[in-house]
Amino acid sequence: MARWDARFYYLDWRYFNKLDRDFWEMCLDDEGLVRAEYRSWLQEEENVSGDLTNWKVSREACELYEQLRGQLPSAARVQADTLLGRLFGFADSDYWPGFAGWDYSPAEGEWLKKTEVNHLLSPQKIKELLPLWQPELAVAITSVMGIRPQDTYLNCVEAFLAYLEEWIELLKRANQLGDRGLLVLLS
Protein backbone atom coordinates (compact mmCIF):
# COMPACT_ATOMS: atom_id res chain seq x y z
CA MET A 1 0.00 0.00 0.00
CA ALA A 2 1.46 3.34 -1.04
CA ARG A 3 1.76 5.94 1.67
CA TRP A 4 -1.13 8.34 1.98
CA ASP A 5 -0.45 11.53 3.81
CA ALA A 6 -3.16 13.41 5.64
CA ARG A 7 -3.31 17.17 5.86
CA PHE A 8 -5.52 18.90 8.39
CA TYR A 9 -7.19 22.28 7.93
CA TYR A 10 -9.38 24.49 10.08
CA LEU A 11 -12.13 26.13 8.05
CA ASP A 12 -14.15 29.14 9.16
CA TRP A 13 -17.59 27.58 8.87
CA ARG A 14 -19.16 30.74 7.47
CA TYR A 15 -17.32 29.92 4.22
CA PHE A 16 -18.38 26.28 4.08
CA ASN A 17 -21.05 26.69 1.38
CA LYS A 18 -19.12 29.30 -0.58
CA LEU A 19 -16.41 26.93 -1.75
CA ASP A 20 -16.72 25.16 -5.06
CA ARG A 21 -15.03 22.50 -7.16
CA ASP A 22 -11.85 24.57 -7.55
CA PHE A 23 -11.41 24.80 -3.78
CA TRP A 24 -7.84 23.51 -3.54
CA GLU A 25 -6.58 25.18 -6.70
CA MET A 26 -8.06 28.45 -5.51
CA CYS A 27 -6.76 28.30 -1.92
CA LEU A 28 -3.38 26.56 -2.21
CA ASP A 29 -0.25 27.75 -3.96
CA ASP A 30 2.15 25.59 -5.99
CA GLU A 31 3.87 24.36 -2.80
CA GLY A 32 0.56 23.34 -1.28
CA LEU A 33 0.46 26.20 1.24
CA VAL A 34 -2.65 28.25 1.89
CA ARG A 35 -2.48 31.46 -0.14
CA ALA A 36 -2.21 34.64 1.95
CA GLU A 37 -5.62 35.95 0.91
CA TYR A 38 -7.38 32.83 2.29
CA ARG A 39 -5.52 32.46 5.59
CA SER A 40 -8.13 34.36 7.56
CA TRP A 41 -10.65 31.57 7.02
CA LEU A 42 -8.56 28.52 6.03
CA GLN A 43 -5.66 27.47 8.21
CA GLU A 44 -3.52 24.38 7.81
CA GLU A 45 -2.53 22.69 11.06
CA GLU A 46 1.24 22.51 10.90
CA ASN A 47 1.96 20.90 14.28
CA VAL A 48 0.69 17.44 13.42
CA SER A 49 2.67 14.36 14.37
CA GLY A 50 3.90 11.81 11.88
CA ASP A 51 1.36 9.33 13.27
CA LEU A 52 -1.53 11.58 12.26
CA THR A 53 -0.14 12.47 8.87
CA ASN A 54 0.70 8.85 7.97
CA TRP A 55 -2.70 7.45 7.05
CA LYS A 56 -1.50 3.86 7.49
CA VAL A 57 -1.58 4.55 11.24
CA SER A 58 -5.27 5.43 10.99
CA ARG A 59 -5.98 2.19 9.20
CA GLU A 60 -4.07 0.31 11.88
CA ALA A 61 -5.96 2.20 14.60
CA CYS A 62 -9.24 1.07 13.03
CA GLU A 63 -8.13 -2.55 13.01
CA LEU A 64 -6.86 -2.32 16.58
CA TYR A 65 -10.08 -0.78 17.82
CA GLU A 66 -12.08 -3.48 16.04
CA GLN A 67 -10.15 -6.06 18.08
CA LEU A 68 -10.71 -4.15 21.33
CA ARG A 69 -14.31 -3.03 21.03
CA GLY A 70 -15.94 -6.38 21.77
CA GLN A 71 -14.08 -6.53 25.08
CA LEU A 72 -15.11 -3.05 26.24
CA PRO A 73 -18.01 -2.61 28.65
CA SER A 74 -21.11 -1.61 26.67
CA ALA A 75 -21.19 2.04 27.80
CA ALA A 76 -17.50 2.50 26.94
CA ARG A 77 -18.03 0.75 23.59
CA VAL A 78 -20.89 3.08 22.61
CA GLN A 79 -18.84 6.10 23.64
CA ALA A 80 -15.76 4.89 21.78
CA ASP A 81 -17.74 3.89 18.67
CA THR A 82 -19.13 7.40 18.43
CA LEU A 83 -15.86 9.19 19.15
CA LEU A 84 -13.43 7.04 17.19
CA GLY A 85 -15.83 6.57 14.30
CA ARG A 86 -15.97 10.35 13.84
CA LEU A 87 -12.21 10.84 14.18
CA PHE A 88 -10.10 8.34 12.26
CA GLY A 89 -12.86 5.78 11.68
CA PHE A 90 -13.52 6.90 8.14
CA ALA A 91 -10.17 5.32 7.22
CA ASP A 92 -11.91 1.95 7.10
CA SER A 93 -15.67 2.40 7.13
CA ASP A 94 -16.89 -1.20 7.31
CA TYR A 95 -16.47 -1.58 11.04
CA TRP A 96 -18.53 -0.18 13.90
CA PRO A 97 -22.21 0.66 14.20
CA GLY A 98 -21.36 4.35 14.55
CA PHE A 99 -20.10 4.36 10.98
CA ALA A 100 -23.56 4.27 9.54
CA GLY A 101 -24.26 7.71 10.97
CA TRP A 102 -21.43 9.93 9.89
CA ASP A 103 -24.01 12.65 10.34
CA TYR A 104 -22.96 14.54 7.27
CA SER A 105 -25.77 16.84 6.34
CA PRO A 106 -26.88 16.63 2.68
CA ALA A 107 -25.01 19.89 2.05
CA GLU A 108 -21.85 18.50 3.67
CA GLY A 109 -22.07 15.28 1.66
CA GLU A 110 -22.36 17.19 -1.59
CA TRP A 111 -19.55 19.50 -0.57
CA LEU A 112 -17.27 16.55 0.22
CA LYS A 113 -17.86 15.11 -3.25
CA LYS A 114 -17.11 18.31 -5.10
CA THR A 115 -14.12 19.53 -3.08
CA GLU A 116 -12.21 16.24 -2.70
CA VAL A 117 -12.03 16.69 1.07
CA ASN A 118 -11.96 13.23 2.61
CA HIS A 119 -13.57 14.04 5.94
CA LEU A 120 -14.92 17.01 7.81
CA LEU A 121 -16.14 17.79 11.28
CA SER A 122 -18.35 20.83 11.73
CA PRO A 123 -17.88 23.10 14.76
CA GLN A 124 -21.07 21.66 16.24
CA LYS A 125 -19.84 18.07 15.79
CA ILE A 126 -16.52 19.02 17.42
CA LYS A 127 -18.41 20.40 20.44
CA GLU A 128 -20.35 17.13 20.68
CA LEU A 129 -17.24 14.94 20.43
CA LEU A 130 -14.88 16.69 22.85
CA PRO A 131 -16.74 15.62 26.02
CA LEU A 132 -16.64 11.96 24.92
CA TRP A 133 -12.92 11.64 25.59
CA GLN A 134 -12.88 10.96 29.31
CA PRO A 135 -10.27 9.35 31.58
CA GLU A 136 -12.71 6.49 32.17
CA LEU A 137 -12.65 5.62 28.47
CA ALA A 138 -8.85 5.55 28.47
CA VAL A 139 -8.95 3.25 31.53
CA ALA A 140 -11.43 0.92 29.81
CA ILE A 141 -9.23 0.74 26.69
CA THR A 142 -6.14 0.15 28.83
CA SER A 143 -7.84 -2.70 30.68
CA VAL A 144 -8.60 -4.68 27.50
CA MET A 145 -5.60 -3.96 25.29
CA GLY A 146 -3.03 -6.70 25.26
CA ILE A 147 0.46 -6.96 23.83
CA ARG A 148 0.86 -5.90 20.22
CA PRO A 149 3.46 -6.89 17.62
CA GLN A 150 6.47 -4.62 17.82
CA ASP A 151 6.49 -4.01 14.05
CA THR A 152 3.23 -2.05 14.26
CA TYR A 153 2.78 1.70 14.58
CA LEU A 154 0.56 1.38 17.63
CA ASN A 155 2.45 -1.38 19.42
CA CYS A 156 1.35 -0.60 22.99
CA VAL A 157 -1.58 0.94 24.82
CA GLU A 158 0.40 4.12 25.44
CA ALA A 159 0.95 4.59 21.69
CA PHE A 160 -2.75 4.03 20.95
CA LEU A 161 -3.87 6.44 23.68
CA ALA A 162 -1.32 9.03 22.53
CA TYR A 163 -2.70 8.71 19.00
CA LEU A 164 -6.23 9.31 20.29
CA GLU A 165 -5.02 12.30 22.31
CA GLU A 166 -3.50 13.83 19.17
CA TRP A 167 -6.91 13.70 17.48
CA ILE A 168 -8.50 15.29 20.55
CA GLU A 169 -5.88 18.06 20.47
CA LEU A 170 -6.85 18.82 16.86
CA LEU A 171 -10.47 19.16 17.95
CA LYS A 172 -9.52 21.37 20.89
CA ARG A 173 -7.50 23.69 18.64
CA ALA A 174 -10.41 23.95 16.19
CA ASN A 175 -12.76 24.71 19.07
CA GLN A 176 -10.43 27.41 20.42
CA LEU A 177 -10.33 29.11 17.02
CA GLY A 178 -14.05 29.78 17.23
CA ASP A 179 -16.52 28.73 14.56
CA ARG A 180 -14.03 26.45 12.77
CA GLY A 181 -14.49 22.98 11.40
CA LEU A 182 -11.78 20.41 10.80
CA LEU A 183 -11.09 19.20 7.25
CA VAL A 184 -8.95 16.18 6.38
CA LEU A 185 -7.38 15.87 2.95
CA LEU A 186 -5.51 12.72 1.93
CA SER A 187 -2.83 13.01 -0.69
Image: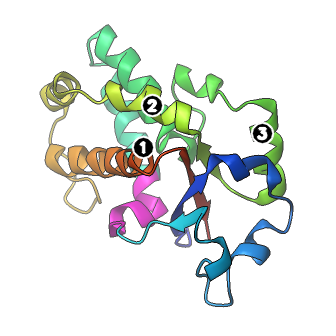
Task: Examine the image and state in which quarter residue 30 appears.
Answer: bottom right
Classify residue 93 as left or right of residue 49.
Answer: right
57 over 140 or under it: above or below: below
Foreground: disc 3 or disc 2: 2
The answer for how far apart the CA atoms under marks 2 and 1 are is: 7 Å
Q: Which residue is mark 3?
A: 109
Q: Residues within 10 Å of mark 1 (few under 14, many from 20)?
A: some
Q: Secondary structure at mark 2?
A: helix
What percent of the width, then of the height, locates residue 70? 34, 19
Residue at x-position 29% and y-position 60%: 153
Q: Locate the C terminus by quadrant.
A: bottom right
Taking the magenta stretch, the answer to whether it contains residue 21 is no
In this rendered view, identify the residue nearer to me: 105 or 150: 105
Q: Decide which of tag 2 and tag 1 comes sooner along the chain.
A: 2
* Amino acid marked by disc 1: Asn
Please indicate, yes or no, whether residue 119 appears anywhere in the rendered image. yes
Classify residue 180 as left or right of residue 143.
Answer: right
Q: Which residue is mark 1?
A: 175
**What segment carries the magenta color?**
48-58
In this rendered view, identify the residue nearer to me: 73 or 120: 120
* Amino acid marked by disc 2: Lys
* Amino acid marked by disc 3: Gly
Q: Decide which of tag 1 and tag 3 comes sooner along the chain.
A: 3
